[in-house]
Image: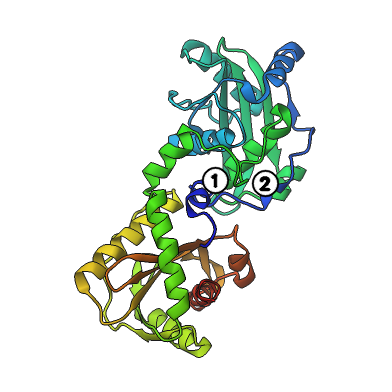
Amino acid sequence: MKMHLQTRSVLLILMGLSMHACTSHAQSSTATSESGGTDALLAKFKAAGRNASVTVFPAGIVGRPIRPVGDVVAAMLERAGMPNIQIDAPEFSPPREADLAAIAEAFAAFVGTHPISTNYAVYSDFQGTREKGFTEIRTVIATREGRVVWQDRQTDADADFKRVRPKEPMECCLLVVERLRPLLGLGDPAQSTAPEGPIAQRWAARSGVPDKEEMGAMNIRQDQFRKRAATATLLVLPSRVSGEYDGTCAAHLAAMINEKGLTQARASGSAPSIAAANDMNEQKVLWAMARGMKVYVTQSRPDADYVLFAEYLAAPGSGGRLDVRGVHLAVCDREGNWVIVDFQNSHHDDFRAVRPESREDCDRLVVRRLERLCR
């Protein structure tokens, strides 16, 4: 959290943008990618490069258009260096059980009858099942007049699909952008110096990410916590696991924190009432929890220097394991001011090192994060 939090929050604005997967460009060609139109149309699109004006349509998940997912593609393209991006487009539903060529023609025809203000339109569709996850990523580029420019299909037989290994909608968005990067000469959207345009700023506001002033104040409070952690008292609240509070996690966390000598921790015996958000935007979930904790601590005034609350986004997996999608934690001071707000998912080194598959694993990840942030 010592890094620039505002940049980090925008970079990882929805369910975590993979930082490591963006480090290399997509392969320049693949057997599953083709122009879908004339060579002249594709050449003109490539020549426009990052200056091409593009409307990103709501992306489809198994054919169902979901606007926020398309907006993520747009935000990533914007950070990759495309300044002329629009997102206010109607929803397109592809023909059922159609192949990529049929979807491309249908989308182009749709664009031709639904005027847009840009020269090009982008549509992506993510196919898969609950059991197998995402198995196919399709992307189509069309002109505003309704002609197919480019179409791309990625499956587990393709190198870029294998490299990104999309398990979540946001990782599918990442793969879409990775495929377009060499085509248009785009930059890396995960770089800290990547431009933040109006789409990214809009998403930050929607996600509830604090402004730079509050982030700066939190950095100062974190430094103060680090200096006095060894002698400070920490009240550990029952964690929220899959929406339910669990006091055993609080006891386990407090014991591990004390064992490592991070601070003087004790478990709370009563479950808090902290607001939660059910949203595909992980940052929105994180900051809704952080705001709820601020309210709770401010109202309850606990007898401790600091208060810790953790939330584990998980669902039952096979063999009694948990399918853990995210581990969130927040530390407030006794006045309710944020000291630490941190999240971990499969894109982060500590998450991958612990590989949480149980509540106890999630507890260990929380302590691992605290250890890094306290020392």
Q: Crowdedness of circle 1 by 10 Å Cα count: few (<14), some, many (20+)?
A: many
Tell me the amino acid under the disc marked 2: Cys
The number of numbered badges drawn on the structure is 2
Q: How is the image coloured?
A: rainbow
Residue 93 % position (x, y):
48, 27
Question: For the view shown, which residue lies furthest in the bottom direction?
Answer: 259
Q: CA distance from mark 1 to mark 2?
A: 13 Å
> Label 1 belongs to which residue?
170
Residue situated in front as seen by the camera: 209 or 181: 209
Tell me the amino acid under the disc marked 1: Met
Q: Are marks 1 and 2 in contact (CB under 8 Å)?
A: no
Judge depth for marks 1 and 2 and give the one in front: 2
> Label 2 belongs to which residue?
22
Figure check: 215 above or below 150: below
Residue situated in front as seen by the camera: 76 or 132: 76
Residue 150 % position (x, y):
68, 22
| Callout 2: SS | helix
Look at 57% across and 32% down and name the residue there. Answer: 124
